[in-house]
Image: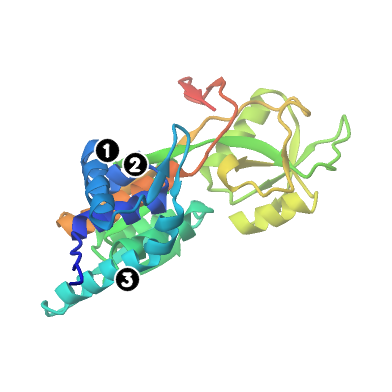
Amino acid sequence: MIEVISLEVDAVRAFVTIADFQSFTRAAEVLGTTQGAISVKLKRLEDRLGQKLLERTPRQVRLSAQGEMFIQSARAFLTAHERALADLTASRRRFALGIASHVMGPEVSSLLAKLKSLDPTLIIEVRVDSSRSLLDLYDAGSLDAVIIRSDDDRRDGETLGPEHFGWFAAPGFVHCKGEPLRIAGISPSCVVRDVSTSLLDRAAISWTEVFIGSTSAIVAALSAGLAVAAFPHRLAPADVVEVSERFALPPLPSLSIVLHSSLTDPKSREALRAITAAFREHPRSAPQRTVTSLSGHALIG
């Protein structure tokens, strides 16, 4: 007689979420539970299958050989479950997310993939635009959530992580003593530009703006060796270096990446927890030093 093994949806979802984030802590955050609870669910699944699915060390969580074999089937199992439930409802859920163009970074692609794997029946609509346009759409009810930088809006939101800034340039960038420092900026109305140039003025460092463009255009200008820019560590390309010490430039204050959301239903809150976890797991390393903002408050940058 062939033994029929039945799987618990919550246990399979715990396994897949742990595997996706490679962390029991992040998985618990996404699923809105505790590490202890998902550990119990994983153990129950492994006991049911008679296989060890994850290898856990103090520094790493990774799939075992059996976990590698099971992960795709586990995803298909969850997809089938969600679609079966969706077939009982009249319409599929939609989630409209706005992301500020200067926030778009390497974690966004993994974020969207994790949102899709978390709920395959969720229709995700993403708009990338200026923070002001996104906030207007959010206030009008056209967007369910927006991710912006803290300098773009003063209302309260959920902090997803710090945004550390530094002065970046190509390794071969040359600044001749006695000449104005050639800098690149996003736009005259950019808070980061205003703060960085004011700090240069305060330090009596002469400067001239030789390039103005979008975030991606600034990356190109830096890589080409045209200028120095106050730029997020998170978004700096691999072919540029931090040059604060080389050119004795003033330290820059940090900002925060913030999530604003109007979603309240449990399934959508799961998606929001996935967004939070995806941003928090991405490294944002920067030299830890105390600097002073233009208003005189101590900040870490």
Estimate the x, y position of residue 99 in percent, counting from the top left.
42, 57
Estimate the x, y position of residue 67 in percent, counting from the top left.
40, 56
Circle 2 — which element? helix
Quarter assignment of residue 174: top right
Q: Is residue 270 visible?
A: no
Viewer-closest of 85 and 218: 85
| CB under 8 Å between discs 2 and 1 | yes
Q: Which residue is tagged 3? A: 76
Q: Residue at x 22, y 42 (%)?
A: 40
| Label 3 – label 1 distance at C-alpha | 24 Å
| Label 2 – label 3 distance at C-alpha | 22 Å
Viewer-closest of 242 and 250: 242
Q: Residues within 10 Å of mark 2 (few under 14, many from 20)?
A: many
Kindly identify which numbered label has been placed on residue 35: 1
| Label 2 – label 1 distance at C-alpha | 6 Å
Q: Residue at x 78, y 28 (%)?
A: 246
Three-letter amino acid code at disc 1?
Answer: Gln
